[in-house]
Image (cartoon, rainbow, N blue to C red):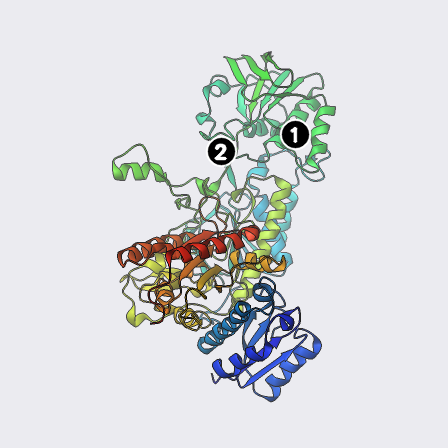
Amino acid sequence: MDKKVAVYICTGCGIGDALDIDALSKVATKECKAPVCRNHPNLCGAEGLQMIRDDIANEGVNTLIIAACSQRVMYDVFNFEGTIMDRVNLREQVVWCHPANDEDTQMLAEDYLRMSGARMKQMLPPEPYQPEQELSKDILVVGGGTTGLSAAIETAKAGYGVVLVEKEAELGGFQKGVSKNVTFPFKDIQANDIDALIAAVKSNDKIKVLTGSKIEKLSGGPCLFNATVKQNGSTSDHRIGAVVLAAGWKPYDPEKLDKKLGYGASPNVITNVQFEERAKSGQITRADGKAVKTVAFLQCAGQRDPNHLAYCSSVCCFTALKQAIEVKRQDPKSNVFVFYKEMRTPGQGEDFFRKAQQEGVVFVRSQDPEVLGSGNSLSVEAHDELLGEKILLDDVDLVVLATGMVPATAFGEDFKAKKAEEEEKKDDIVVPADAILVSDILNLEYRQGPELPGLQYGFPDSHFICFPYESRRTGIYAAGPVRRPMGIANAVEDAAGAAMKAIQCVEATSKGMAVHPRAGDMSYPEFFMQRCTQCKRCTEECPFGAINEDEKGNPLPQPTRCRRCSVCMGACPERIISFKNYSVGMVGDIIKSINVPDEYEEKPRILVLTCENDAYPALDMVGLRKLNFNPWVRVIPVRCLGSLNLVWIADSLSKGIDGIMLLGCRHGDNYQCHFIKGSELASIRLSKVMETLNRLVLESDRVRFEMVAITDYDKIPGLLDQFAEKLVEIGPNPYKGY
């Protein structure tokens, strides 16, 4: 592509008052070699935009540098088809957070223009990935319970084909065995309408239902998935666009509960799931068939307990209220007690709590109730926190334990036992938070494992609040209780959300675009295989399993799985992975374009590599609130700190830059990294750099890693100023001036 560069400098929003625009224009024309350079007081207005469009039409301009506000705003306004463009952030990160008409502020603005010029020399227009195979927009729904059925219906309503796979012989899932429900508007018990939902699915000609079936193999990626489904001894192949995983849940094993809860000591101590079986039969009785007069519901049986289920299962309080009302309506004279730690009925669910009170259900707040006796002679002893005394409930006919919800994905290979066997140990085995359990649901043909990586408790959600339904495998979306514990109302809503995500995925992928979080990005990684050493770092470090390997260990990228985080680019020691609009060489040239004065005492330089998702927006927030920070700083936004290639550190230090700070997302159990592991990988790589610097007698304190959230904007000026003070204490980079 023959580039014709044009630089447009906005003088509005205080930029023209704070900077020497003529000096900036000279940098654009002489150093960036832009044949066209113009300024305008309102570049985002109709007149300013028309000026740019006229240059594109009449002057043949195809490479634009817009020096104005942050690239995080006006992105829909500064959108010119057929061009490549870069945004120079003069407003939020120059004039709004540094003194006006100051030498350092002017040098900062000029450096940012130089850096943009270096970026545009390397940048090429991305070409969308267009595979040779035929693309599919059909959605595979795994699971035929309420969530799966709802997802199938919503997808079909939107006009997309659905393949619904259910392992059981009948559709309906858990709800098939439930007689009554409690759902929005939470005013009373409602009839179970699962049969109507099943009928709607079966009668929809866009939905292909496969019951008594399982996925034997799932290969490929979004729009190119190939699902091999086994049913009644035969197999069939289906080309799929995206997947909604609605595999459901299983109750926590009551055999694992503490003995003081009485499970196993009496047939009249049952779980909330077993209660549903009795209620479905039409009569709630003891094990011997006699009517119940006194029933005790014990909440949080094994839940919110680090020895069992450390989390709350969300629906148990509603379930207990429903079941308690069912007992009262069977016999209004019966005595029904609910022993609870906290009664959790958020939102309009509070109405249903009041309904149970009106029906005569008695509530006892107690953290540690105990079931005494055996057979048909049961009592419940508890400390009533509201009365402040111990109570004893005698002659209890039925005790119902609220066991929790465990995602179907958590029932896989016992990682801890396997590890213990391999290492001949029985204790101190640490299970990785993202250990992949062989749960025999999706059977992915991925180098990284056959199932979705789970979180601490086996849920396959991405665990990031901005991206619900996502898993760590692109194009596969978890919904319903397999994603997190939830009731019917939430499961139906979840199904619609996951279906929408799956549809967004197939539509974006069919156009060659990336999906979340870099939605719309047309670039994808390109591999220069002649220099590949088969080190496997790209396949091992990719957070989304986007790269397989052949039998020789060569990487086999699957572009439709890629989310364009560029972690593979940062991982590659040979630097053979690049994107047309983002590469190791491009960032290296940007670093080299920074003007580093020889006089350290006057003008040290700090390079800050910032994550574009949290740290860069936080820096914009600093400007929006007119907070000042050190003018020695030069910021380069990166897609993810996981894309950090260590050569950038070497380039910076050899250039004479005095310090390098990495601003990334929080990692660990409660990570905030949009790309899951990027920040953590950058931290690990940086620790190796520091060791090398120490060996070269070049202070490791010159390089620093800091974790920030977007809400930490007020802390950033202090971090940068403290780092600058430390560099003054260390002294100038010895490579300065070479």
Q: Quadrant of residue 651?
A: bottom left
Residue at 70% across, 26% down: 356
**Up-down relation of residue 27 to residue 448 (above or below):** below
| Kind of residue indicated by mark 2 | Ala
Residue at 57% across, 56% down: 501
| Kind of residue indicated by mark 1 | Lys
- The Cα–Cα distance between marks 2 and 1, rounded to whole angstroms, is 24 Å
Question: How many residues crowd around disc 2 within 10 Å: few (fewer than 14), some, or many (20 or more)?
Answer: few
Percent coordinates x, y for residue 559 in the rendering: 44, 65
Q: Quadrant of residue 391?
A: top right
191 or 110: nearer the viewer: 110
Mark 1, residue position:
322
344 or 3: nearer the viewer: 3
* 647 sits to left or right of 88: left
Residue that sits furthest to the bottom in the current view: 58
Mark carried by residue 508 = none
Q: Quadrant of the C terminus?
A: bottom left
Percent coordinates x, y for residue 379 in the rendering: 56, 13
Q: How many numbered dots are placed on residues in this image?
A: 2
Percent coordinates x, y for residue 334 in the rendering: 68, 17
Mark 2, residue position:
310
Percent coordinates x, y for residue 145 in the rendering: 56, 43
Indicate the secondary structure of the residue bearing disc 2: loop
Q: Is residue 268 visible?
A: yes
**Up-down relation of residue 684 to residue 60 (above or below):** above
Residue at 59% across, 14% down: 396
